[in-house]
């Protein structure tokens, strides 16, 4: 004979909330915190780098790393991308721009003797002197090498802060690796910002938004 359920007990059973199977969310929360903190630091550091290099890396990194699911070919492609963008950071650190006497904006590459102008449309040396003035003042200095070194350091820090790069090269990294990837952008950012502040450059590098390498001439 089937037993009947007490109506009052049935009402109490309905009020008991359903409990889903317990799971540890600590790992997911930590991963989210790591990702947010790293991305925030990388975004701030990217302002000190050439815009073209950063945009090229951000545009291609997801595809080259297969969204973090890296095969051997993806790792080689990602390494080529990082090396190419690092070289572009060095190149743009030695670029400069100025306004000629004809009010036209000129761009060039600093050399040991002066500035090699890219968009030079003059035909004689006399026209060059009238339009450009003394280009020897734009020659390479030791400070340019310092800024080039820290630009590469910053870019490598930003690239290591990318989530897809981390999944591709450090998928099996432990807590120590995660802590390093989180705090490395902070340390590199403080160090590089200090160097750029204490030793500013007057170069108006090509591709730097707001002439972030230093003060305008």
Image: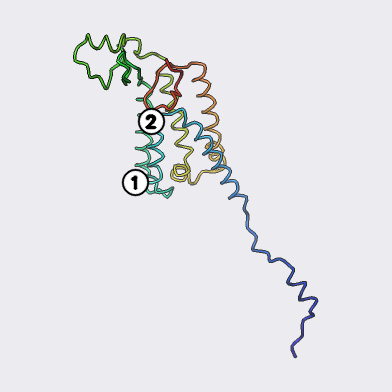
Mark 1 surroundings within 10 Å by alpha-carbon count, few (fewer than 14), some (14 through 19), many (20 or more): few
Residue under pointer 1: 73
Q: Position of residue 144 (x, y in %)?
A: 40, 18
Q: Residue at x 51, y 19 (%)?
A: 197
Label placed on residue 86? 2
In the rendered image, the vertical position of residue 11 relative to residue 118, given as above or below: below
Residue at left 40%, top 42%? Answer: 61
Q: Quadrant of the N terminus?
A: bottom right
* Front one among 59 and 204: 204
Q: Position of residue 216 (x, y in %)?
A: 43, 17
Q: Secondary structure at mark 1?
A: helix
The answer to which image quadrant residue 13 occupies is bottom right
Up-down relation of residue 167 to residue 40 (above or below): below
Mark positioned earlier in the residue sequence (1 or 2): 1
Q: Position of residue 73 (x, y in %)?
A: 34, 46
For label 2, the SS is helix
The residue at 39%/20% (across/down) is 204
Image quarter hosting the C terminus: top left
Which is nearer the eye, 128 or 201? 128
Q: Estimate the spatial distance between the alpha carbons at disc 1 and disc 2, rounded to whole Å.
A: 20 Å
Looking at the picture, tell me which residue is in the foreground, 182 or 137.
137
Quarter of the image for residue 107 reads top left
């Amino acid at each position: 004979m089937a037993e009947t359920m007490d109506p009052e007990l049935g009402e109490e059973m309905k009020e008991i909330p359903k409990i889903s199977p317990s799971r540890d969310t600590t790992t997911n929360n930590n991963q989210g915190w790591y990702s947010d903190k790293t991305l925030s630091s990388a975004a701030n550091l990217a302002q000190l780098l050439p815009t073209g290099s950063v945009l090229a890396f951000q545009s291609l990194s997801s595809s080259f790393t297969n969204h973090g699911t890296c095969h051997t070919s993806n790792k080689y492609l990602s390494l080529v991308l990082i090396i190419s963008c690092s070289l572009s950071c060095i190149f743009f650190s030695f670029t400069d721009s100025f306004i000629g006497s004809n009010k036209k904006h000129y761009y060039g590459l600093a050399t040991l003797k002066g500035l090699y102008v890219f968009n030079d449309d003059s035909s004689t040396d006399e026209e060059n002197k009238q339009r450009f003035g003394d280009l020897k003042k734009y020659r390479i200095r030791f400070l340019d090498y310092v800024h080039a070194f820290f630009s590469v350091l910053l870019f490598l820090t930003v690239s290591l802060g990318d989530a897809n790069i981390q999944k591709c090269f450090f998928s099996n990294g432990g807590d120590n690796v995660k802590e390093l990837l989180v705090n490395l952008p902070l340390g590199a950012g403080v160090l590089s910002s200090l160097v750029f502040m204490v030793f500013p450059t007057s170069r108006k590098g090509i591709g730097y938004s707001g002439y972030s390498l230093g003060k305008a001439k």
